[in-house]
């Protein structure tokens, strides 16, 4: 069963803050963390429908994070936000079962639409 819980992972505290305020204003319950290791600790104790994460994370490569999340929590939708939308990265994301990969300079309305469709 889907819920409105989103885990937001990014090493940029300002980005986390702004995106979490926006998503909360749209009725989502948002939990934030700045690294992938902490994200797994949070996932163990909470139910999330969606994880939104940046690609270049300290402590754990984001693709490794996404693959591990998909293996351990197959019902979670994973959205990656990155500055590098290279064909190789998009292909790796598709092979890893990532829901969507978006440019960091994304249109916030598009992100909201993807989240709602994923739920």
Image (cartoon, helix red, strand yellow):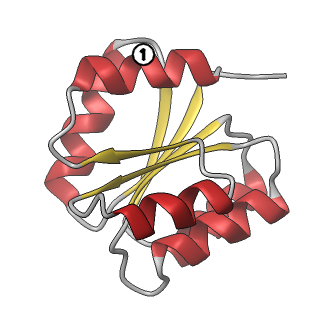
Residue 51 at x, y = what percent?
55, 46
Residue 82 vs 34, above or below: the answer is: above
Q: Residue furthest bottom?
A: 59
Along the viewing direction, whichever of 47 and 114 lies nearer the viewer: 114
Above or below residue 56? Residue 50 is: above
Indicate the position of residue 71 as horizontal and vertical percent values: 81, 64
Q: On screen, 117 above or below 29?
A: above
Question: Which quadrant: the C terminus?
Answer: top right
The picture places residue 109, in percent across and down from the top left corner, at 27, 17
Q: Say which residue appears at 26% left-offset and 29% top-offset.
A: 21
Q: Residues within 10 Å of mark 1 (few under 14, many from 20)?
A: few
Residue in the image at 32% along x and 15% along y: 25
Residue placed under numbered mark 1 in the picture: 113
The N terminus lies in quadrant = top right
Task: Measuring from the top left, give residue 7's x and y in whole percent.
Answer: 52, 46
Q: Answer left or right for 32 relative to 63.
A: left
Total of numbered circles in the picture?
A: 1
Residue shown at 74% from the left, 58% from the top: 70
Residue drawn at (54%, 36%), measured in percent from left and top?
A: 6
Asked if residue 21 lies left or right of residue 95, the reply is left
Mark 1 element type: helix
Residue 26 as seen in the image, left or right of residue 14:
right
Asked whether 107 or 11 is in front, the reply is: 107
Between residue 58 and residue 115, name the one nearer to us: 115
């Amino acid at each position: 069963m889907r819920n409105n819980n989103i885990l937001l992972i990014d090493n940029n505290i300002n980005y986390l803050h702004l995106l979490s305020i926006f998503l909360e204003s749209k009725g989502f319950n948002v939990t934030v963390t700045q690294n992938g290791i902490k994200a797994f600790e949070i996932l163990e104790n909470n139910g999330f429908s969606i994880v939104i994460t940046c690609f270049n994370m300290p402590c754990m490569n984001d693709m490794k994070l996404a693959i591990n999340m998909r293996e351990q929590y197959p019902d979670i939708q994973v959205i990656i936000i990155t500055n590098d939308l290279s064909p190789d990265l998009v292909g790796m994301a598709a092979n890893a079962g990532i829901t969507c990969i978006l440019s960091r300079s994304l249109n916030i309305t598009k992100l909201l639409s993807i989240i709602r469709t994923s739920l």
